[in-house]
Amino acid sequence: MSQRMILGLLLILTAFIVANARFKDKKLKEYKNDERWQLIVMKSSKILMIYFYALFLITALGYIYFAVFSASSPTIALRTVLQYAFYLFMIRNVIEYGALRYYDNAF
């Protein structure tokens, strides 16, 4: 990936970290941690678990495919693997922010 694209992606993901933290803090004070807010947080946590299960499933299927069907495995740098893992982990904040906003409007 080009340096500008990486920087742009990191800035966007960092903005979502800040937005997610501010939104959670604002709503926690607004709802005073009542049952409605706890239900919203539980529903958004369920969405996050589905995201992590999907990542695990894709990783497991990729491993099985390359272990069983591929004679030669592609070589990839550890730095690249860790970079993509970092981005996938950071996307968690985007998903959580979207789920919190959605369920806050739904309830």
Image (cartoon, rainbow, N blue to C red):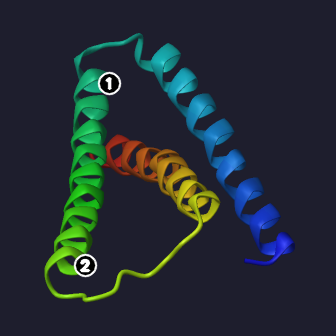
- Disc 2 crowd rating (10 Å Cα; few below 14, some 14-19, many 20+) is few
Q: Residue at x 24, y 68 (%)?
A: 63
What amino acid type is highlighted by mark number 1? Answer: Trp
Q: Nearer the viewer, residue 48 or 57?
A: 57
Quickly name the residue at label 2: 66
Check the image and report above or below for 68 versus 39: below
* Image position of 58 (left or right of 76): left
Which quarter of the picture shows residue 9? bottom right
At a point 30% along the width and 41% down the height, the residue shown is 44
- The answer to whether residue 27 shows anywhere in this view is yes
The disc label shown at residue 37, or none: 1
Q: Along the line of sight, which residue is nearer the eye, 65 or 88?
A: 65
Say left or right for 102 vs 70. right
Residue 54 placement (x, y as % from top left) = 24, 60
**Quadrant holding the N terminus:** bottom right
Q: Is residue 107 visible?
A: no
| 1 or 2: mark nearer the eye | 2
Label 2 residue SS? helix
Q: Position of residue 17 (x, y in %)?
A: 62, 40
Please identify the residue farthest to the right as the structure is shown: 4
